[in-house]
Image: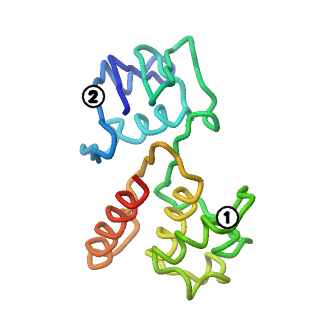
Amino acid sequence: MIEVQNVSVHYGQKKVVDNLSFTLGDAELLTLVGPTGCGKTTILQALAGLIPISKGTIKLGSQTVTASKTIAPEKRQVGMVFQDFALFPHLTVIENVSFKLKDNAKADHWIELLGLTPWRDAKPANLSGGQKQRVALARTLAHEPAFVLLDEPLSNLDAALKDDLRWEIRQALKEAG
């Protein structure tokens, strides 16, 4: 479960998020919708621990984060899929997905489930936008995070692909629990 209580985030003197509260139960999906610049990415970055909160409380399962009590991103059990995919260009699909894993079995599972097997040995420059998005999602899920954050995962894709990939992502998240 994720609980966000009265969270505010400032960039210097500028308040970007003000007094946000919501609860997300286990196995629930939540979509943040709003115009450009309203703070959607800032909220995700705060949940992931990439930026500090100025006020409030974030509860991620048994962990509690406040402005004075931070938890490093790598200790939060949060996986994040970035808008620009953030793939290592010099690594193949399997190397990207299995990065920092001791066993490739989890990576192989998600590569197969997300239909990436034919591109297992391809580098990101040789993949379509949809394939890159699947690789980024597979990499996140292979690390078995407790929570997955997706920052505009479909914004770089064409309209036809968005519809198909939206359902694939939803199914993959349900599969991962």
- For badge 1, the amino acid type reads Ser
* Mark 1 neighbour class, 10 Å CA radius: few under 14, some 14 to 19, many 20 or more: many
| Image quadrant where residue 157 sits | bottom left
| Residue marked by disc 1 | 98
* Mark 2 neighbour class, 10 Å CA radius: few under 14, some 14 to 19, many 20 or more: few
Please give left or right for residue 90 compared with residue 162 in the image: right
- For badge 2, the amino acid type reads Phe
Residue at 39%, 64% (x, y): give it: 172
Comparing marks 1 and 2, which lies closer to the viewer? 1
Please give left or right for residue 116 compared with residue 43 in the image: right
| Residue marked by disc 2 | 22
Q: Position of residue 176 (x, y in %)?
A: 43, 57
Measure the alpha-carbon separation of dots 1 and 2. 33 Å
Please give left or right for residue 148 compared with residue 49 in the image: left
Please give left or right for residue 81 compared with residue 166 in the image: right
| Image quadrant where residue 153 sits | bottom left
Q: Position of residue 10 (x, y in %)?
A: 45, 21
Name the quarter where the N terminus is drawn: top left
Q: Position of residue 173 (x, y in %)?
A: 38, 58
First along the sequence among labels 1 and 2: 2
Picture mark count: 2
